[in-house]
């Protein structure tokens, strides 16, 4: 199985991660700024074709491609038990994030800030599409991804293993900074508009807010994820795991 990637940065990152397993790269004819992508692909012996924009538009199926497409291997998924092992793991869980832009931007935060695995339920979630990859700026190629049948069951299992599971809630009475995030931790970010689902909320050991709400009730999911991961990383630099 393979997938089409669109955009300069997603294709660059795919080449860096997958090398010659990228089957081909198509570049828009007459676009000199793409010579660097051509050189990178050629260094991995990946076939490159310069084609008309119409052919790229047809293959991209609506995804903004910046004149670059590639055919890369399917993303690899990691088993839950693997994600939950290690010394004081930090995991980001997504509950009902269906917007590929938010999903991709959240994955970018997880990879860039904490190298945190990303966990989500297979239902009511954005698919792993070219649009999501582009929103992640190619970070998804470096991500440890774990898709489970039931996010609630996965969180309950994590709690049984001693994890602190913190659901972000703008109206919670506890500030995230007051929760110990130095040990095995899962931070759960809710979907656009609805926030955390009822069952997921019940699976959390804590509900916490990033900031007290003022003009708006909540932050964008990817922004909330970035701030929460930053707080977890800050704590881990200043206190040992409990």
Image: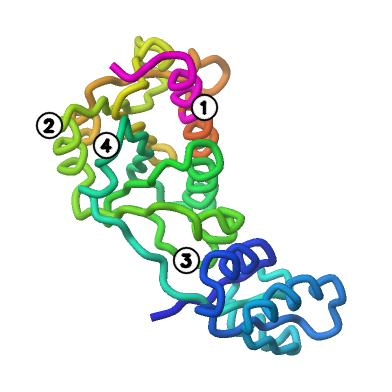
Residue corresponding to mark 2: 160
Residue stretch rendered in magenta on the structure: 229-242
Residue 225 location (% of width, % of height): 47, 34
Callout 1: few (<14), some (14-19), or many (20+) C-alpha neighbours within 10 Å? some
- What is the distance, in whole Å, between disc 4 and disc 3 at their CAs? 24 Å
Residue 213 shown left or right of residue 40 in the figure: left
The residue nearer to you, when weighing 204 against 45, is 45
The secondary structure that most of the magenta stretch takes on is helix
Q: Earlier in the sequence, mark 3 or mark 1?
A: 3
Quadrant of image for the N terminus: bottom left
- What is the distance, in whole Å, between disc 4 and disc 1 at their CAs? 24 Å
Q: Is residue 214 above or below residue 22?
A: above
Residue corresponding to mark 3: 129
- Say the numbered circle drawn on residue 197: 4
The quadrant where residue 176 appears? top left
- Secondary structure state at the residue bearing disc 4: loop
Foreground label between 4 and 3: 3
Task: Tell me which residue sits at (33%, 47%) in the image.
Answer: 119
- What is the distance, in whole Å, between disc 1 and disc 2 at their CAs? 25 Å
Residue corresponding to mark 1: 230
Q: Earlier in the sequence, mark 1 or mark 2?
A: 2
- Secondary structure state at the residue bearing disc 1: helix
Q: Earlier in the sequence, mark 4 or mark 3?
A: 3
Question: Which color mode does the image show?
Answer: rainbow
Quadrant of image for the C terminus: top left
Q: Is residue 238 above or below residue 115?
A: above
Callout 4: few (<14), some (14-19), or many (20+) C-alpha neighbours within 10 Å? few
Residue 152 location (% of width, % of height): 19, 41
């Amino acid at each position: 199985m393979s997938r089409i990637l669109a955009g300069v940065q997603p294709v660059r990152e795919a080449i860096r991660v997958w090398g010659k397993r990228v089957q081909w790269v198509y570049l828009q004819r007459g676009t000199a700024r793409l010579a660097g992508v051509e050189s990178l692909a050629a260094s991995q012996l990946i076939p490159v074709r310069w084609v008309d924009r119409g052919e790229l538009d047809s293959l991209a199926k609506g995804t903004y491609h910046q004149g670059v497409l590639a055919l890369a291997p399917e993303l690899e998924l990691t088993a839950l038990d693997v994600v939950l092992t290690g010394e004081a793991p930090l995991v980001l869980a997504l509950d009902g994030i269906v917007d590929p832009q938010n999903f991709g931007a959240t994955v970018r935060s997880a990879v860039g800030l904490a190298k945190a695995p990303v966990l989500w339920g297979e239902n009511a979630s954005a698919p792993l599409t070219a649009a999501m990859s582009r929103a992640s700026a190619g970070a998804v190629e470096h991500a440890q991804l774990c898709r489970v049948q039931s996010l609630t069951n996965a969180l309950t299992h994590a709690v049984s293993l001693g994890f602190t599971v913190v659901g972000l809630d703008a109206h919670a009475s506890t500030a995230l900074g007051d929760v110990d995030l130095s040990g095995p931790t899962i931070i759960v970010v809710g979907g656009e508009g609805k926030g955390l689902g009822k069952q997921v909320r019940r699976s959390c050991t804590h509900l916490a807010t990033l900031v007290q709400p003022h003009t708006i009730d909540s932050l964008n999911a990817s922004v909330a994820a970035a701030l929460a991961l930053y707080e977890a990383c800050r704590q881990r630099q200043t206190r040992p795991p409990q």
